[in-house]
Image (cartoon, rainbow, N blue to C red):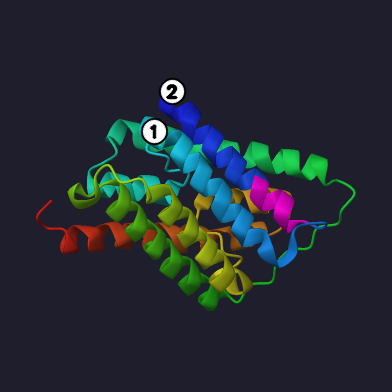
Amino acid sequence: MRNYLVEFIGTFFLVLVIGLTSINPGTGVIAPLAIGAVLMVMIYAGGHLSGAHYNPAVTIAAWIRGKCPSKDVLPYIASQVLAGIIAATIVTFLKQPTSVSEASLATFPALVTEFLFTFALVYVVLNTTTSKQTEGNSYYGLAIGFTIMVGAFAGGPISGGVYNPAVAVGISTMGLSAWNNLWIYLLGTIAGGSTGALVYKVVNQDE
């Protein structure tokens, strides 16, 4: 139960910051910096407890890698998605005077962007947090947070820079994305994360 609570807290603050920095009045072009930073600090806070996934695509990838027990996969995902919904509801309350416009997505470019940067995220996560060669390092949170920041800056104009199914549910709840776009995020992130885990296993066969 402790691990599920940690996953809830980390995902909650990630989605909360995404909403507060993205909905007008937001932080403009530097929003990705705040988003990467909150993910980084929450990873440092919870990494030693739950693994600090805060992302269903990462949980699935960790399971493929053999670093997340099967019994924890669905509870982790449920905690993350619930946190995203509750955080989105609070953002909507805090920003209620503001009108929110849904992002317009080009399906295939958005799908490819979500796939590629979720792949990058999982590849970094697994190499910095699960590899014997990097065991005990102090930079894993910074590396992961910066990966999200880079992905948000680079892919944000194309797909919104989500890279996380729980975040996808959260921004849909806030009205930042149409619910009929949800499948793009789910397919792109889960496929990208799973591919990242498989590639990790290929290039780290000694583990």
178 is within the stretch colored magenta: no
- Residue designated by label 1: 50
Q: Give the quadrant of residue 190.
A: bottom left
22 is within the stretch colored magenta: yes
How far apart are the alpha carbons under marks 1 and 2? 8 Å
Q: Is residue 82 or residue 147 the one in the foreground?
A: 147
* Secondary structure mostly seen in the magenta stretch: helix
Element type at marker 2? helix
Horizontal side of 100 relative to 158 (left or right) equals right
Check disc 2: other Cα within 10 Å, few if <14, some if 14-19, many if 20+: few
Eyeballing the image, is 55 above or below 146? above
Residue placed at 87% from the left, 53% from the top? 98
- Residue designated by label 2: 2
Span of residues in magenta: 17-23
- What's under tag 2, amino acid-wise? Arg
Residue 149 location (% of width, % of height): 54, 61
Residue 102 location (% of width, % of height): 74, 63
Q: Is residue 43 or residue 50 the one in the foreground?
A: 43
Eyeballing the image, is 207 above or below 108? above
Check disc 1: other Cα within 10 Å, few if <14, some if 14-19, many if 20+: some
Horizontal side of 204 relative to 62 (left or right) equals left
Do the numbered discs 1 and 2 sit on residues whose CB atoms are within 8 Å?
yes
> Is residue 64 at least partly visible in the picture?
yes
